[in-house]
Image: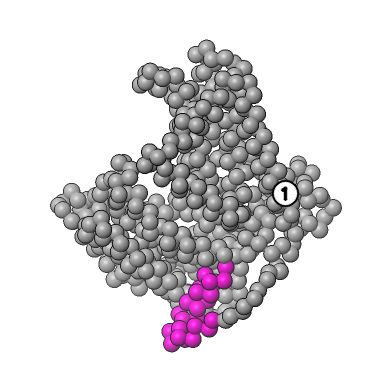
Amino acid sequence: MFRKFIALEWKAFFRSSAFASNMVLKVFMIIGAIYFTGMFLLLGFGSYHIIKDATDEDPLLLVNRYMIYYLVSDLLVRLFLQKIPIINIRPLLTLPIKRGTIVNFALAKTAISFFNVIHSFFFIPFSIILLVEGYDPLHVVFWHLGILSLIYVNNFLNILLNNKDGLFVGFIVFLSIAAGLQYYEVFDITEYTGIFFQGMYTTAYTFILPLAALVAVWISCFRYFRSHLYLDTGLSRKQKDVSTEDYTWLNRYGILGTFLKNDIKLIRRNKRSKTTVIMSVVFLFYGLFFFTGMLEMYDNSFMHMFAAIFITGGFLFTFGQFVPSWDSAYYPLMMSQNIQYREYISSKWWLIVIGTVASTLLASFYLYFGVNIYLMILAAGIYNIGVNSHLVLLGGAYIKTPIDLASSKQAFGDKKAFNVKTMLLSLPKMLIPMALYSIGQLIGNNWGVILVIIAGVAGFAFRNSVFSMIEKIYKTEKYKTLASYKQKN
């Protein structure tokens, strides 16, 4: 049965309408994968000797001491980038296939994920070097198995965190408290975790604990998805109060107001779209990592501009990045109506502008760190309105990824609000203002902020011309977009 599932996945991949249209992005992703693979290989073969030459400590002991940071970083990266298992279950549930088989296949798909395989390019060479340097072969194998098990624990823990909001909130709270205690030297977690990781080498049984944890997490994932593997999962909900919002005050803006009403209702009524608002608020505090001097590598004006773009562009990056994918469920219906693309694009743009202005005003508490810091944030806000707001709308014409707004109610729905494609298209939005700021700083003090503001104002001034260009691109990509939104897997 697994072989048949693999054949179906293979056909779905190559028959997807998005396969050819996203070839350029796939090439960049392949280049990135090759780069990180090479870096992990170099670290795997060279880290032992680098540590040995730089310190007097046992390299394995030092690696084990800080292994907890490696695993936590891996889990955080997965939460942002790794997709949870997706499989089109509707046609399968009408066939004589056991639900357990479907669940096991979906979970097994993640085992060959790049986020799991990449770690082998570090730990296998590192383990080989340990054997060459005279470490006990059997104990090295035990240690390697233990670490590999913890990598896969992260894999399945990521799936649970993406589907159980309570668990996700608890994880974030725990991680924040642990990071705070570690930073202020109240509690050093490495003193305890280092002993455990070293124990996987020095003892003959400690590696069994990660294996047991892996089995436990797999069973938890299996039970969760098996219990939710129904077509009508989440259709029935208890509702005590029912309220409607007409937003009649937007009628004065005509068609533009109609689109704005639809977007506001979409954000209020769907869990995934609500998450964009929550993430926008979270992004406001991103600057604390940069402006407080918490991390020395971020304590410079160049990285401060990077933070300012994120602080004011939280809603832009989380919501605007997926225009028009938010409307993918009824996009064919919209295109059958007499709708002008200009009004549609303008409504999205105004929504992004409102979100950016709100973020810029709410970020005024950064005045505590100095007027120069807030001027930088204000400049970033103007740039996001004038330039980046257009770039996200332009990128939306090419990111033809349908969004299932009810995915949080279905097993194996794609709940990711962030992926590699959007990350690649986000790079110019961050790098260009940083480059402008750096050029301005070479000219003189405050010229960096001035150049960023000029770029934002210029973008705003030419918005009509930009809208005309974006409108033409949307019309050109219209039928490709419709075909992509019809993809079910």
Circle 1 — which element? helix
Which residue carries the number 1 mark?
223
* Residue at the extreme right of the image, as rendered: 96
Residue drawn at point x = 65 percent, y = 52 percent: 86
Q: Which residues are magenta?
A: 245-270
Disc 1 residue type (three-letter):
Arg
What x and y, as percent, mark residue 400? 54, 60
Magenta region includes residue 5: no
Can you say whether 394 is above or below 66 in the image?
below
**Left or right: 284, with 97 as reference point:** left
Nearest the eye: 418 or 478? 418
Q: Is most of the magenta stretch helix, strand or loop?
A: helix
Which color scheme did the rendering employ for the protein? Answer: one colour
**Left or right: 307, with 135 as reference point:** left
In the picture, the quarter occupied by the N terminus is: top right
What x and y, as percent, mark residue 40? 48, 31
Q: In this view of the protein, can residue 243 be seen by the observer?
A: yes
**Residue 200 lies in what quarter of the image?**
top right
State the count of labels: 1
Nearest the eye: 159 or 258? 159
